[in-house]
Image (tube, rainbow, N blue to C red):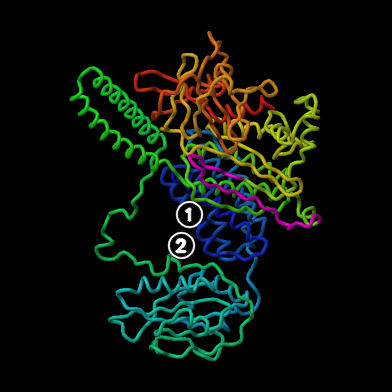
């Protein structure tokens, strides 16, 4: 939904804008982007008749426009009003997407009232305008929009030098060359306006005057531009700016420069605007002639509902099963004497297998999205909660281009939100406490993601006070989760955090303290066959490590049997398989283990896990499948290994989840049998918990 994409981008950009409120150094490009987003959302809502969205976005656009023109004061109070308006927009857009008809009239009225309270003009400054002493050519001053005039005044108020950079371009390449120069200038100042000018050779060249604000000196700018056909004049000096009567000539000397402040500031920039105030990228060619009549789209992307991709993936899965069935028929034909036909059928199945692999890979790539889309949502949460709690928190990202299945990214959003909320509430200290501890006033939360084999690891780390393990043990004893904490290790104690109803906060607030959240984190991550671990150092910080499968759609699985039943284990979790006898198994604290390369590997029998009574004990040799998620390892005792196969995991539904611990779903085999797919992450967690 396009409206949802716009609101997501607005939220991310508003969060960046909030970081600038303390310094008051407003990024005009960022503000213009937010303004355009609100304007686009208003137009989109008006087109489809969503009046509530249109009303909120219209009022938000008015406030942003006043901020662009310097008519309202830029501070944290204004950011709060904009953030509240964005939250209301997000809520309304979500309601529309879900088909809700609930009215938001009272919330909208309150939001509009807050916006109107901000729309009080600071009043016109007394005395002459600074522009009257700048020496700006009249033709240029008359061409400036209200927004550009405001940006010019803002640059003057900050003590930046104002320059007119006059340059000439060949008509055939002027758009690329102009864009190149403006991009260079943006690295050391603000391009206030780009205006066409009069040159000496209008048949083959086109001239432009670039109004520019910077702390750099003219000589530095000339060296940066590195063009012959350029004149740089600083306004407010004795040198006159270029005009229509003095066209630019190659090799003209740089105008004299008055002493500059030593301070160097690289400012974000803005481009010239249309009459409606919407900025235009410098050098962007305007549609003329045949181009203006073309109806061809410039975009080569399409928006596809994830439900359609799910349906397509299911069809591919059925084709994979059909391929397995055909392969089985070919194998039986060879054994029954139809060797020639079996060989030809086998060749055909090999071709089909290659094409299915390509098709499966293509569908998977369509479903994959960068984790960075999730990061943008987390950024808004951090700013909102830290502002509410009076804490200063900086969010850092690494590995934003790591890709995950779209559905997994959606399912991990809530667990990530809970972890970050707890990091701010429990972990990051207040600024005065951090300074007393010798830390920087602003806390840091770092989110990193990277691929590890067939999994993606997401780490959330803060530099707060860490988890007080002794306090966790005390709370666990107080709440009755454990009877004796004497034998509880620190690692075991950290697992109590994920129990329902557990919280170390004595007071309940809007963020945490109710004992709900971290149990949801583990359950939601386990539901997508993932795992979560905690590492903490008291006084230094905490790290949550989330290990996830890349996708839950079509996967390759190891088919095994136990007590006459057939199961599938995702091959991404299988490390190796062993052939053992009873004498290889040892008992430690009434738990079966084996020695594997100088490490002790706990064993888990599927019969014991699922409460299946064996008619006879295992004799002779049997298999142990070694599985692992993150750094945890487990040996699953099975009767036989039946081979590998591509499977499509189907959900068991909410009604059956509580009856199938250790099961992530079901799958159909090529022979029309339905088998259960083991949840390796859940089994490893259960084995580690019961083994402690």
Residue 385 appears left or right of 52 = right
Between 34 and 64, the one nearer to me in the picture: 34
Seen in the picture, residue 586 relative to 614 is either above or below; the reply is: below
Q: Position of residue 273 (x, y in %)?
A: 45, 66
> Residue 450 lies in magenta, yes or no?
yes
Seen in the picture, residue 668 relative to 398 is either above or below; the reply is: above
What SS does tag 2 mark?
A: loop
Say if residue 43 shows up in the picture.
Answer: yes
Question: What residue does disc 1 label?
Answer: 39
Q: Position of residue 174 (x, y in %)?
A: 35, 74
> Residue 30 lies in magenta, yes or no?
no
Give the mark nearer the N terminus: 1 vs 2.
Answer: 1
Cβ–Cβ under 8 Å for marks 1 and 2: yes
Seen in the picture, residue 677 relative to 49 is either above or below; the reply is: above
Classified by dominant secondary structure, the portion drawn in magenta counts as strand
Give the CA distance from mark 1 to mark 2: 9 Å
Q: Residues within 10 Å of mark 1 (few under 14, many from 20)?
A: many
Say if residue 7 shows up in the picture.
Answer: no
Question: What residue does disc 2 label?
Answer: 278
Residue 448 appears left or right of 486 = left
Circle on res. 389:
none
State the quadrant of the C terminus: top right
Residue 369 appears left or right of 23 = left
Q: Quadrant of residue 356?
A: top left
Q: Which residues are magenta?
A: 436-459
Residue lying furthest front: 583
Residue drawn 73% across the image and 51% down it: 390
Q: Position of residue 400 (x, y in %)?
A: 52, 50
Q: Residues within 10 Å of mark 2 (few under 14, many from 20)?
A: some
């Amino acid at each position: 939904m396009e409206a949802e994409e716009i609101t997501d981008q607005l939220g991310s950009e508003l969060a960046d804008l909030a970081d600038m409120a303390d310094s008051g150094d407003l990024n005009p490009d960022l503000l213009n982007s937010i303004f355009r987003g609100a304007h686009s959302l208003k137009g989109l809502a008006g087109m489809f008749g969503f009046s509530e969205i249109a009303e909120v976005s219209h009022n938000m656009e008015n406030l942003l426009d006043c901020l662009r023109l310097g008519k309202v004061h830029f501070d944290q109070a204004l950011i709060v009003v904009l953030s509240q308006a964005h939250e209301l927009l997000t809520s309304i857009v979500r309601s529309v997407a879900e088909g809700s008809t609930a009215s938001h009239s009272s919330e909208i009225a309150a939001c509009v009232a807050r916006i109107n309270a901000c729309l009080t003009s600071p009043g016109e400054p007394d005395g002459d305008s600074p522009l009257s002493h700048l020496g700006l050519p009249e033709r240029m001053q008359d061409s400036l929009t209200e927004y550009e005039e405001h940006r010019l005044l803002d640059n003057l108020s900050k003590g930046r030098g104002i320059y007119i950079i006059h340059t000439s371009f060949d008509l055939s390449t002027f758009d690329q060359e102009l864009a190149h120069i403006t991009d260079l200038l943006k690295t050391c100042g603000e391009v206030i306006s780009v205006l066409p000018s009069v040159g000496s050779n209008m048949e083959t060249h086109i001239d432009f005057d670039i109004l520019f604000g910077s702390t750099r000196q003219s000589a530095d700018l000339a060296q940066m531009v590195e063009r012959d056909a350029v004149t740089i004049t600083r306004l407010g000096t004795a040198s006159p700016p270029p005009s229509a009567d003095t066209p630019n000539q190659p090799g003209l000397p740089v105008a004299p420069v008055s002493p500059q402040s030593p301070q160097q500031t690289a400012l974000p920039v803005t481009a010239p605007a249309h009459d409606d105030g919407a900025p235009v990228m410098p050098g962007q060619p305007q549609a003329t002639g045949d181009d203006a009549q073309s109806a061809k789209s410039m975009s080569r992307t399409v928006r596809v509902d994830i439900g359609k991709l799910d349906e397509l993936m299911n069809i591919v899965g059925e084709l994979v099963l059909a391929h397995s069935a055909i392969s089985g028929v070919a194998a039986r034909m060879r054994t029954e004497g139809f060797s020639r036909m079996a060989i030809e059928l086998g060749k055909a199945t090999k071709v089909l297998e290659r094409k299915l692999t390509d098709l499966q890979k293509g569908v998977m790539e369509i479903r994959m999205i960068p984790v960075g889309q999730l990061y943008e949502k987390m950024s808004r949460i951090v700013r909102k909660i830290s502002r509410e709690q009076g804490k200063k928190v900086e969010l850092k990202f690494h590995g934003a281009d790591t890709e995950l299945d779209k559905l997994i990214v959606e399912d991990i959003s809530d667990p990530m939100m809970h972890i970050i909320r707890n990091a701010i509430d429990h972990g990051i200290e207040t600024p005065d406490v951090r300074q007393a501890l010798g830390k920087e006033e602003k806390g840091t939360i770092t989110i990193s993601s990277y691929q590890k084999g067939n999994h993606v690891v997401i780490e959330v780390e803060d530099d707060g006070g860490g988890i007080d393990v002794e306090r966790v043990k005390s709370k666990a004893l107080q709440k009755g989760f454990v009877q004796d904490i004497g034998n509880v290790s620190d690692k075991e104690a950290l697992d109590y955090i994920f129990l329902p109803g557990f919280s170390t906060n004595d007071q309940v607030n809007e963020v945490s303290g109710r004992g709900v959240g971290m149990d949801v984190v583990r359950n939601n991550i386990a539901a997508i066959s993932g795992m979560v671990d905690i590492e903490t150092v008291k006084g230094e910080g905490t790290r949550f490590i989330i290990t996830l499968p890349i996708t839950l759609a079509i996967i390759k699985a190891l088919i095994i049997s136990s007590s006459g039943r057939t199961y599938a284990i995702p091959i991404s979790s299988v490390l190796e398989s062993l052939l053992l006898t009873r004498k290889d198994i040892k008992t430690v604290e009434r738990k079966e283990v084996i020695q594997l390369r100088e490490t002790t590997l706990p064993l888990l029998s599927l019969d014991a896990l699922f409460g299946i009574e064996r008619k006879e004990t295992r004799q002779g040799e049997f298999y142990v499948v070694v599985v692992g998620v993150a750094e945890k390892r487990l040996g699953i005792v099975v009767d036989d290994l039946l081979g590998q196969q591509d499977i499509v995991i189907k959900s068991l539904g909410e009604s059956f989840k509580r009856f199938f611990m250790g099961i992530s779903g079901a799958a159909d085999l090529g022979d029309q049998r339905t088998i259960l797919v083991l949840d390796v992450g859940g089994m490893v967690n259960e084995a580690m918990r019961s083994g402690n």
